[in-house]
Amino acid sequence: MWFRGALLALFVVSCADSGTEGLNGFDASVADAQPSDAEAIEQLEGIVTVVESLGLVHLSARFQADPTDRFGCEQQIHGACRVLLCEASNEMKRFPHAGEIIAVAGTSTLSVSPSALNGVYATAELAVRWVPGEPVRIAGAGDEVPSFAAELNVPQTLRAGSWIVGPVSSGEPLEATWESTGPGRALVAFSQGISSTRFVYAECAFDAQAERGIVPPEVLRELPSGQVEARLMSAEMQEIEAGTWTLNLTTQTLAGLGAVAVTH
């Protein structure tokens, strides 16, 4: 079983501090138009995510040779939002990898290496607070996935509005608001276990400077009734090519953590 209750990454690394490891770092933060099945079959995908959350910085990575599998999750796209419905599995799979991966900001370095058994990366964490705007260098040594390197920044700071602890009706759109200190992306995310083996993660990506985003009812209807964890993340994203692989690199900072009461 490769997840226990919910995603940091991917989504993510960002859930690690709440006691849930998520989907091994799969980052649902990029909610752009998805390729057709025919296109996706020929696309090799990887996601590397660095998240600062409650005084810890987490680094996770995952590579998938068959993106139509969506890392074992059923995926829905609703405008700027992505919903992942995931089923735990005891099936042993082997994943391609890029050797050791590092993330460096200032004098701090995190590194993760793949399992020799199945190529899966464990999440690395470091007790440090990075400065907004500080450069973050992310690099992979290379293996089945070619070597790569890119530079992003630590995201700017956001402050969540009252929606993050309020009631939510799945019959109406939810207006999420925040205060922004600069450019970047604002990620509004919800995560919750549906049963002992099923998990739902929903994430919407908005322009941070807009200071508001609308989560459609189609997304809210996929959440279970009752208390659902809610998060606001600030993010910077970069898509790069490594040989025939498309890699999505993301830096994120937790800006708000709460719970909404969902009714259907």
Image: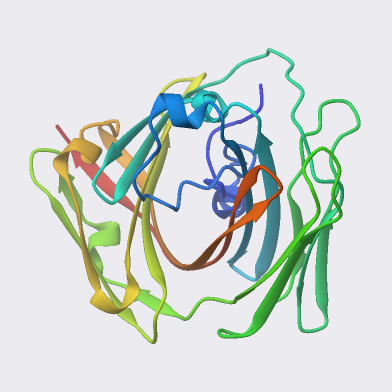
Q: Nearer the viewer, residue 152 or 109?
A: 152
For residue 187, side relative to residue 27 (left or right) = left
Asked if residue 7 is positioned above or below residue 138 in the image, the reply reads above
Residue beneath the point at 79% across and 39% down? 97
Q: Position of residue 53 (x, y in %)?
A: 58, 65
Query: Residue at 54% of width from left, 24% of height from top?
Result: 72
Q: As drawn, is 46 to the left or to the right of 206?
A: right
Residue at x 46%, y 46% (from the top left corner): 28
> From this viewpoint, which residue is outermost toward the top?
91
5 or 59, nearer to the observer? 59
**In which quadrant of the rendered image does the N terminus lie?**
top right
Residue 143, percent from left and from top: 86, 42
Q: Is residue 53 above or below residue 230?
A: below
Where residue 9 appears, as percent x and y from the top left, is: 56, 48
Q: Residue at x 24, y 39 (%)?
A: 219
- Name the quarter where the C terminus is drawn: top left
Q: Is any atom of residue 185 visible in this view? A: yes
